[in-house]
Image (cartoon, rainbow, N blue to C red):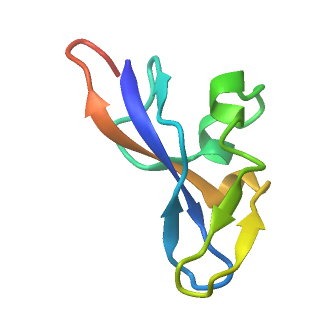
Amino acid sequence: MITYRGYVSCDFCGELHSLSPSVLIKGGPAKRISIAELYSGRDVPTDVAVLQNQQIFCPATGKTFCETDRSKIYLFPIYPLKGGG
């Protein structure tokens, strides 16, 4: 199992903003990947889908937004466990 932190690509400032909560994925890659790539042609598990439709605050512009495009939501591995992956 690998723990991932979600990040979204901001249309306002172009930076990545973090999402909560972190998610555990069995057999996930040990590199950054978008939700669209990881779950291409498959249903997104509920614990990963929760990263979509969140209200995200952009500190650079002061605006909030909601990202539903799975290709703009990235998972970054933060804690690979022994024997996982």
What is the residue that sits farthest to the top in this orientation? 83
Residue 49 visible from this viewpoint:
yes
Q: Position of residue 62 (x, y in %)?
A: 63, 82
Near-viewer residue (46 or 37): 46
Residue found 59% across the figure and 37% down from its top: 38
Residue 11 found in image quarter? bottom right
The answer to whether 53 appears left or right of 38 in the picture is: right
Image height check: is 54 above or below 60? above
Residue 69 found in image quarter? bottom right
Near-viewer residue (32 or 21): 21
The answer to whether 1 appears left or right of 57 in the picture is: left
Q: Tally the numbered discs.
A: 0
Residue found 78% across the figure and 49% down from its top: 53
Image height check: is 65 above or below 77? below
Residue 45 visible from this viewpoint:
no
The answer to whether 23 appears left or right of 63 in the picture is: left
Residue found 76% across the figure and 27% down from its top: 42
